[in-house]
């Protein structure tokens, strides 16, 4: 497939290939859509086998960011960057500063952050060359770890699921199976036990699961058994593609609401299978938008209180998605995509009307001036 066919397939606005021989930087920045605002998305560093694989990944991820920002109600577009290389061996200050200069060259159309393979330290190098970077340490005026805000959004989204299913959003005495006792998982467990839910937690590192379980009074479950727990809610907070042909038949859950990205192995197929099993699915990118909300707040001078307040809006967003899903008889992930597209279309329309008016006013002004 030609590069332009690739880029045009999902209407990307701009793709920038960045090469800096002295530092060995090979990166691609993809800007999918800036109708709502500057394109914000992290920089992933990965050992892509081919340049084409890197391009496919950055195009897919940047498009996902457009939808995530739109559904979260943020004035942000979708973008993402990938650096081709081994994050454990090839990172240097010079590389990230060279990357920062490419970001600076886009003059704010793209704002970067951390992602898989990059860390706060790397973003500090990027920041030496550009101000268009988020995910900076709290001590340096950034927003720090986004996990508490992500987890709070997941918790609120979970309550919305319960409201949809039972008419009450209380999680007291409900059973929740949490997969992954990492950054997001541990904070979700905390919210849940505080509300009186009964929590089961698993991790591939047993010590992590044990530690979280002891802290919040949850029960540890072996990683492979988490799909079979007799619980009301499954909360995936580890890897993607865990809702698949093998796991769905094991589910006794009524709700899937968790922080992990790309939970459905195949959106269409497994989205439909969940409907057939009567399982309510909170679309991953809508319920885990707290992390993006957190970095968005960094752009305006960070306040965790404000970020948490905004993340509580995920409750209404999830209910809105369910309402579209019911009214239009479509799976919830499709309803979420539709909500995102509708917002982009309506704001774009509003902007073009406004731009037309201001042009008109501008011309009138000039003419008036000319007459005087
Ligand atoms: P993390 O690495 O801190 O935690 C993930 C945990 O899952 C780790 O403890 C890991 O050992 C465990 N794990 C991995 N495979 C497992 C398995 N098969 N069974 C049980 N446990 C397993 O990561 P995190 O920051 O908590 O993020 C969790 C998920 O949420 C990821 O998919 C991430 O992309 C997504 N996410 C995170 C944020 C955020 O703010 N951190 C925001 C949006 C989305």
Image (cartoon, rainbow, N blue to C red):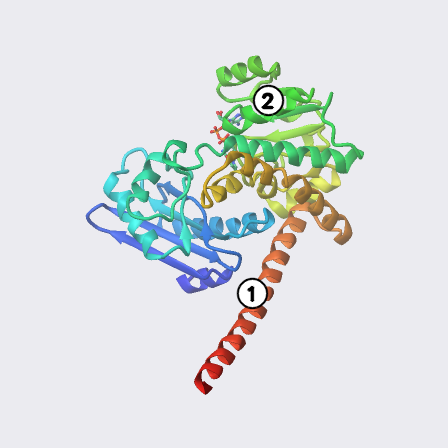
Q: Position of residue 118 (x, y in %)?
A: 37, 37
Q: Is label 2 or label 1 in front? A: 1
10 Å crowding of disc 2: few (<14), some (14-19), many (20+): many
Residue at the disc numbered 1 = 351
Q: Is residue 175 above or below residue 106?
A: above
10 Å crowding of disc 1: few (<14), some (14-19), many (20+): some
The residue nearer to you, when weighing 345 against 73, is: 73
Q: Residue at x 53, y 77 (%)?
A: 360
Q: Position of residue 365 (x, y in %)?
A: 49, 78
Q: Residue at x 38, y 45 (%)?
A: 133
The residue nearer to you, when weighing 306 against 206, is: 306
267 lies left or right of 49: right
Q: Quadrant of the C terminus?
A: bottom left
69 lies left or right of 1: right
Lower sequence index among marks 2 and 1 = 2
Q: Position of residue 228 (x, y in %)?
A: 66, 24
* Secondary element type, mark 1: helix
């Amino acid at each position: 497939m030609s590069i332009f066919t690739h880029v045009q397939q999902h209407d990307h606005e701009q793709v920038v290939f960045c090469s800096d021989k002295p530092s060995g930087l090979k990166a691609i920045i993809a800007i999918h859509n800036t109708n709502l605002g500057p394109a914000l998305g992290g920089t992933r560093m990965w050992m892509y086998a081919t340049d084409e694989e890197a391009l496919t990944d950055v195009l897919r991820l940047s498009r996902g960011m457009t939808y995530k920002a739109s559904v979260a109600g943020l004035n942000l577009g979708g973008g993402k960057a990938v650096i081709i290389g081994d994050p454990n061996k090839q990172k240097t200050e010079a590389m990230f500063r060279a990357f920062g200069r490419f970001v600076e060259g886009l003059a704010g159309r793209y704002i970067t952050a951390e992602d898989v393979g990059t860390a706060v330290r790397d973003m500090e190098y990027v920041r030496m060359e550009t101000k268009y970077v988020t995910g900076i340490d709290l001590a340096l005026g950034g927003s720090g770890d986004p996990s508490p805000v992500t987890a709070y959004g997941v918790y609120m989204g979970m309550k919305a699921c319960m409201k949809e299913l039972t008419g009450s959003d209380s999680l007291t005495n409900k059973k929740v199976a949490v997969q992954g006792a990492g950054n997001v998982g541990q904070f979700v467990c905390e919210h849940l036990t505080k509300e009186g839910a009964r929590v089961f937690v698993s991790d591939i590192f047993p010590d992590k699961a044990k530690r979280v379980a002891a802290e919040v009074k949850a029960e540890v479950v072996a990683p492979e058994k988490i799909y079979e727990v007799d619980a009301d809610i499954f909360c995936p907070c580890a890897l993607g593609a865990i809702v698949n042909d093998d796991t769905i038949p094991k589910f006794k859950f009524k709700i899937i609401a968790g922080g992990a990205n790309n939970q459905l192995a195949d959106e269409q197929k497994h989205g439909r299978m969940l409907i057939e099993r009567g399982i309510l699915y909170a679309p991953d990118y809508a319920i885990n938008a707290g992390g993006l909300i957190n970095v968005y707040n960094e752009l305006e001078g960070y306040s965790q209180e404000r970020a948490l307040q905004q993340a509580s809006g995920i409750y209404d967003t999830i209910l809105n998605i369910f309402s579209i899903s019911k009214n239009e008889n479509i799976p919830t992930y499709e309803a979420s995509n539709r909500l995102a597209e509708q917002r982009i279309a309506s704001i774009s329309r509003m902007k073009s009307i406004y731009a037309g008016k201001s042009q008109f006013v501008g011309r009138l002004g000039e003419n008036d001036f000319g007459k005087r």
